[in-house]
Amino acid sequence: MKTLEDLKRIREEALKAMKVREGEQGTKITVAMGTCGIAAGARETMSALLDELNKRGITDVTVTQTGCKGLCEQEPMIEVTRAGEAAVTYGHVDAERARRIVAEHIVNGNLVGEYIVSK
Amino acid sequence: MSEVAQEKQDLPAIERCHVLICAGAACVASGAMEVEAAMKSKISALNLEAEVSLFDTGCVGTCDLGPVVIVYPEGTFYVKLKPADAEEIVTEHLLKGRVVQRLLSKDADHVEVPSIFEHPFFAKQKRIALRNLGVINPESIDEYIAVGGYASLGKVLEMTQDEVIKLVLDSGLRGRGGAGFPTGRKWAFAKAVEADQKYVIINGDEGDPGAFMDRSVLEGDPHSVIEGLAIAGYAIGATQGYAYVRAEYPLAIKRLQIAIDQAREYGLLGKGIFGKFDFDLEIRKGAGAFVCGEETALMRSIEGMRGQPRPKPPFPAVSGLWGKPTIINNVETLANVPAIIQNGPFWYSSFGTETSKGTKVFALAGNINNTGLIEVPFGTTLREVVFEIGGGIPNGKEFKAVQAGGPSGGCIPASLLDIPLDYESLQKAGAIVGSGGLIVMDSDTCMVDVARFFLEFTVDESCGQCTPCREGTKRMLEILTKITKGRGTLEDITKLETLAKAITQTSLCQLGITAPNPVLSTLRYFRDEYLAHVVDKTCPAKVCRELITFDILPDKCTGCTICARNCPTHAISGERKQAHVIDQSACIKCGECLVRCKFDAVVKV
């Protein structure tokens, strides 16, 4: 490293990876991971969500999990809460749907109507 | 650039959860590594490696709660973990998102504290020197850079040397190793001297019993100390630095070496730092002599000679290591420097009092609920530190005194609990800030015994070079021992005071000059206890063995025989189910019977 610019670049990259330690961020995705959710494939959903966020370099999203929400039929379910907006729950979220929700809802701010269970 | 950027193709992935495990020596000693291993294996068994990361971090400060783990983003603070608990955290919290309530820390009212952000232990603190402990992984230079690391060094290299020194002067930063000399002035002295070679040294020879702030900073945030030293080097015109760390701190040495290697790899140490400055750093291990914390002794030790101080002047800033101008700064002082450069001198001087600017790290030890490491603005009262942050005295006992500044310091009694902690107030009270060790003592502590303990330490650690320290402290210790054995006279107390004065006036270095302090301050505040030992031949705190006896109360004794069976000298006799008696001539006053008795039948009188 020879210049302050080099330092800044390393800093920005490293910061993205550390963002999670600043506490919960603006947008929150909660994956229901009760036994029912995991059996229905919530783990793949979670991996797909993280992978998609990573690919797009999105760091201001907190991904967390919760237990069974009671509507086991609709598992895997995820809930997306953007700052200042009501929570939106999506059902039957497989890996592909998860990626689409990231693209449409998180990035563009448009709800993905066909997967919505409640809002 | 950009060999570094190319090497960094493989950037760390963004994960949903970071688990930071405190890897300070206290937590390691209480089993943090076993907890970490259990967590790691469970994480991999559940295939969570891609989304959850586990890191070591520096001392969080809550040493009595160890091993501790912080789970981000929630900031969940788990305490006193066993390996089995760690597995539960993985299966419940990391996998299913359910916080394991029973492992959370509790506040004074026994209510679970949901996250580290709300923990009362941290609420009153202002962490500057400790800013990255518990936040970053000390073995990752990228993380240090992410939180602003090495930007201060970059900034400084665009300034002139005098501008840097002025900035540090303006901040009001004073040396954290004990004497409290203004850091900027020290630098200015060394800058003013013309020389072909100058040196800067990290003083990591922390030796006070009960003080561990420097170890924790070196273990938890080594890069901040390296950066601070490089800045000092630039300011005075030194190109070579040494880190003098005692060999008893293996983890600190290991992490510092890793940090040095990483900084070299990134070009932040070595030739042409940011294209402008050459500076390198090497570790020198000390053998753990207390006197080597004294700067002239420290330098002799680095030169390969016996660690003994020499008279000053000449001061090291003029003639130091190998006769060259040298600056020696304490670990904590240097850890503050990058933060001061980053945020400005007036930000720093906005904390603290008129003459003691900024914050100070204190190590809480002894009879206190939250033993550990804290950082508060100067001017915080002793009461706030002991009772609010420290959580008060355990087992419902009463606060008696605090020993501030280790063996060179003095004790502060309960009547002075409201004094502000700063250089001047502590000195006026007969103690010193010193390195910041605070040993809290409850009502079961004998102050004569405490003075004897600290003096025993200085007698052991005296280098023996000058007579007042070598002989004087030894004589003082003999007198104190005599008093604790109940053979002291009133004349002995006068002798102690005379000796103390002579030693302070004639010793060569601060070790001798300050050695009588614990005696003088206990004499000042607890003279009645000395008199009780000398005149009444009693020890009010019932500590000094020669002055107490153990007795069995016949009406409480059930004759269970447990005391008799455990007495190492068979001094207790009695029939089963009959009251027992202690043969005083055989009793060695070990107190084993008192500990063993389940019926409170054994008493100390």
Image (tube, coloured by chain):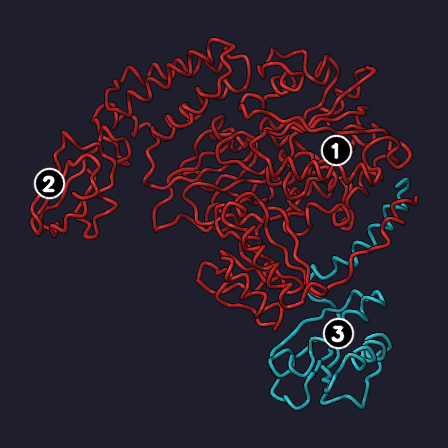
**Which chain has been coloured cyan in this picture?**
A
Q: What residue type is disc 2 on? A: Ser
Residue hosting label 2? B573
* Image position of B600 (left or right of B253): left
Query: Residue B383 or B565: which is nearer the viewer?
Result: B565
The x, y position of residue B145, in whole percent, is 78, 47
Residue placed under numbered mark 1 in the picture = B168
Mark 2 closeness class: few <14, some 14–19, many ≥20 residues within 10 Å: some
> With respect to residue B288, does B43 lie above or below?
below
User: Residue at left 23%, top 47%?
Assistant: B596
Q: Mark 1 or mark 2, which has the lower sequence index?
A: 1
Secondary structure beneath dot 3 equals loop
Q: Is residue B79 toward the left or the right of residue B537 in the image?
A: right
Q: Quadrant of residue B434?
A: top right
Looking at the image, do the residues carrying marks 3 and 1 touch, with CB atoms under 8 Å apart?
A: no
The residue that label 3 is drawn on is A83
Residue at image point 33% right, 16% down: B494
Q: Please, which chain is the residue tagged with disc 3 on? A: A
User: Chain under label 1?
Assistant: B
Chain coloured red: B
| Disc sitting over residue B510 in the figure | none
